[in-house]
Image (cartoon, coloured by chain):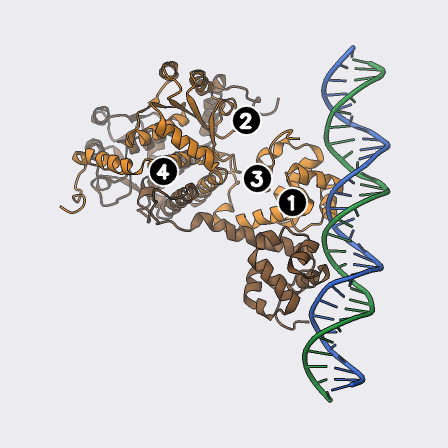
Chain colours: A brown, B orange, C green, D blue
Amino acid sequence: MASSDPPPPAGVLRWLSESGDELHGALKTIADFILTEPAAASRLTIVELAERTGTSPGTVTRFSRACGLHRYADLRVAIAEEVGRSGANRWSTDIGQQLHPDDSLDRVIEVLVSANTQALVDTAERLDPEVLDQVAEAIVGARHCHFFGVGTSAITAEEFGLRVRRIGIACWTWPDVHSALIAASQADERDVFVGISFSGHVAETVEVITAAAARSTTTVVITQDRESPLARRADLLLTTAPPAGNQQAQATADRHAQFLLVDIVYARIAQLTHPAVVEVLDRTASALDGHRLNRRPRRKA
Amino acid sequence: MASSDPPPPAGVLRWLSESGDELHGALKTIADFILTEPAAASRLTIVELAERTGTSPGTVTRFSRACGLHRYADLRVAIAEEVGRSGANRWSTDIGQQLHPDDSLDRVIEVLVSANTQALVDTAERLDPEVLDQVAEAIVGARHCHFFGVGTSAITAEEFGLRVRRIGIACWTWPDVHSALIAASQADERDVFVGISFSGHVAETVEVITAAAARSTTTVVITQDRESPLARRADLLLTTAPPAGNQQAQATADRHAQFLLVDIVYARIAQLTHPAVVEVLDRTASALDGHRLNRRPRRKA
DNA sequence: CAGATTCATGAGAATTATTTTCAGCGGTTC
DNA sequence: GAACCGCTGAAAATAATTCTCATGAATCTG
């Protein structure tokens, strides 16, 4: 029975390429073919495979048995599974490479996806749950809540504001320094100011958060650099993942990281105020009904 | 022939969970079973599968055809491949669970990260590179470029505009329908209009894109639903990944997906206009120098 | 509301794929 | 060189799959 090897517990292809040398003759031929074109092999019937390898169907059946599988059909799905598994690594590989003007579009996509997902994972990993909780609580408990960012971070500020507003908390996103400074000058310790800046070195945002801090508001900062001037002025500091490899993808990756922080804080707020939020969200949704077209009615007819 | 949908080019399981609703009766039963236990399903013979689902072998064959596959054997390997693919990455496990008010913060983070990364990967996979190229080229070649979105999609529109503006293309993001309609009324075939809507059913966005189309501009649409009124009016359609499991994370996941599309188009545009972009980006960066604090001087002193 | 039509379904026949059996053949041993 | 061993493919046997078609449910139409 167990002459050569125990059958492959998982991974026919791996087993073939490793202990595959122990196969002789026709079986070896079949093994080689499968290793060369596993994807194709998994789509062939037993007869076709036999023809392609110059063997016979019966031999292919014996081959399947030699692989520790009962039927030829099992061999097929085993190979297919492994093909799928190896094909899946597309998205986790070559971050850190620069993009060149003549790179294929596929490569651009690949790099951006990996950079962005990596940023999400990295950001999540370095997250301090305690701070996060405090941020959520601060926002929930705030009388007023203010968001500020400049340039690309203005967009994160807007998103944050939109979300928080949507669940019924009084908040503003200020589109420029002056408005933000005015808001800060009228704030007090019951309020929360959120400043967002990728670098943490943007003068306007620092200025706004400084002014807010001077009025004893709770200051929250989202940035990448925890040593930056902006970060130093934060009561509660949330950091996005630091640059990982690829330069060009950095900006976009950080955007995703910032949004992830917003997502999480938002979700946490929703948790903290659960029943209220559910109701508010329903109201929000139905407030938009008149602006939707061709929609199947909500919840069956 | 093509009654409901084109067959799945890649990803039976994905196709089933998306357009799977279009299947009725016995076919639906089979689809559900496969979605529930894909790994098991791929190892069953057609007779076994028929028994388990309370249908007949013939129906299973028809099911395979409905999936765009010729033979049942093809269905098996297709499922197996996909099982292998999803089993390979660990972030795809616990998506689909609802968030409960008393879930731990760690769990919230986990779910959001998985949902978001999944959305990125899914979106990338379903991307049509050709369309993407056409979008990039259209924007590069446009006289004027306009972005419009309402609600949360307004933020994506803004981000898109910000990016494109940054590399020196004349473009606008319109904050409200009226402005957008006015812009559309003055546009012509040299211009590009980009409409963004998660659902594709937002009246305002549809209206703007319709108006733009009437003026023969090139219309680009970013949405999730390729059958939506908005999508139907698009010259060039980019779709984000459809809901994958978790309801609450859906909105945030789609936001990331939209941004990924923006990232990619942006990167592509940068490629197409390479030397120009490098220079413009340098200028953009130095334009902000006066607003940075405590920064080590760029590129040595 | 009856009749017509369409369509999904499963039963069974027809086909195809797979496995098993077995005879032949090349190599090895005595 | 004869006997044996074990691999191999041909062909028979079996299992799986597909095809055909009658049935009945559902929808449409007059």
Residue C14 sits in quarter: top right
> Of callouts 4 and 1, which one flags the residue occurring earlier in the amino acid sequence?
1
> Of callouts 2 and 3, which one flags the residue occurring earlier in the amino acid sequence?
3
Rendered residue at 68%/58% (across/down): A50
Q: CA distance from mark 2 to mark 4?
A: 27 Å
Q: Do marks 2 and 3 share a subunit?
A: yes
Q: CA distance from mark 3 to mark 1?
A: 13 Å
Residue A209 sits in quarter: top left
**Where residue B75 is drawn, which disc sits there?**
1
Q: Secondary structure at mark 4?
A: helix
Q: Chain of mark 3?
A: B
Image coords of residue A79 (percent x, y):
60, 55
Q: Amino acid at mark 2?
A: Glu
Image coords of residue B198 (percent x, y):
46, 28
Image coords of residue A84 (percent x, y):
55, 50
Q: Chain of mark 1?
A: B
Q: Secondary structure at mark 2?
A: loop
**Where residue A285 is drawn, which disc sits there?**
none
Q: With B221 as the anchor, is C11 left or right in this view?
A: right
Q: CA distance from mark 4 to mark 1?
A: 37 Å
**Where residue B267 is drawn, which disc sits there?**
4
